[in-house]
């Protein structure tokens, strides 16, 4: 099998409760079906020892953002494609909210530089209701606030041609991820299908 000339990275971003994890896993499976190696970076916020949701502090969200970067650094060299459930940009939106809109720890340069490392960013839009999962808040106003911040910061850190926007309601078992996988492959200048896959 001929490997891709370079590794690729795709992030699934947005607020919480919008099927990001479902979408990211489905996309990773598509990459595997194409015969390419893939690693999956799971959402790190659920491991946060400092608090999440409305009560999260700036320090708590800084922990999440730095943990996201650490996980991506560890996983990216292991496969042709790294699929991430969240990215630095949506984690930055939660961080800004926790800090009252002020970048208290001057991390924006890191977010800007790291945002450029994603070949594609898939943003899921919240057109489905929040559901209780025992971890994330079901406060609609909180989710809308995060989405508003993300509306402002995402275009600053990810170029429009690297962004795919999808309504969360389209993320079902019937969704076809193949065209987005082919787009990712085109960005690295290689075919999606491995030679030994028919």
Image: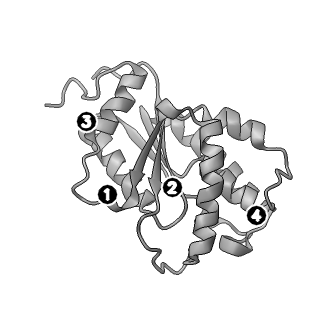
Tag 4: Cα neighbours inside 10 Å, few (<14), some, or many (≥20)? many
Give residue 100's position: percent from left, percent from top.
Answer: 80, 62
State the scheme by which the image is colored. Answer: one colour
Q: Is residue 58 left or right of residue 90?
A: right
The kind of secondary structure element at disc 4 is: helix
Front label number (3 vs 1): 1
The residue where tag 2 is placed is: 42
In which quadrant is the N terminus drawn? top left
Give residue 96's position: percent from left, percent from top.
Answer: 74, 56
Residue at (73% x, 75% y) in the render = 55
Sequence-wise, the earlier of marks 2 and 1 is: 2
The kind of secondary structure element at disc 2 is: loop
Front label number (2 vs 4): 4
Q: How many marks?
A: 4
Please give the label number shown on residue 170: 1
The answer to whether marks 2 and 4 mark residues whose Cβ atoms lie closer than 8 Å is no
The residue where tag 4 is placed is: 98
């Amino acid at each position: 099998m001929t490997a891709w000339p370079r590794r690729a990275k795709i992030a699934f971003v947005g607020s919480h409760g919008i099927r990001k994890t479902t979408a990211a896993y489905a996309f990773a499976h598509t990459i595997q079906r194409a015969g390419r190696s893939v690693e999956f970076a799971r959402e790190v916020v659920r491991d946060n020892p400092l608090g999440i949701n409305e009560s999260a502090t700036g320090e708590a969200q800084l922990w999440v953002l730095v943990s996201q970067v650490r996980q991506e650094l560890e996983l990216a060299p292991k496969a042709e494609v790294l699929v991430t459930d969240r990215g630095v940009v949506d984690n930055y939106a939660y961080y800004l909210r926790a800090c009252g809109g002020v970048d208290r720890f001057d991390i924006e340069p890191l977010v800007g530089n790291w945002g450029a490392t994603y070949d594609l960013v898939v943003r899921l839009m919240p057109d489905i209701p929040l559901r209780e999962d025992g971890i994330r808040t079901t406060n609609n106003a909180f989710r809308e606030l995060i989405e508003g911040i993300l509306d402002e910061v995402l275009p600053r850190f990810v170029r429009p041609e690297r962004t795919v926007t999808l309504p969360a309601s389209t993320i079902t078992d019937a969704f076809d991820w193949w065209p987005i996988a082919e787009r990712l492959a085109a960005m690295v200048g290689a075919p999606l299908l491995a030679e030994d896959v028919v």
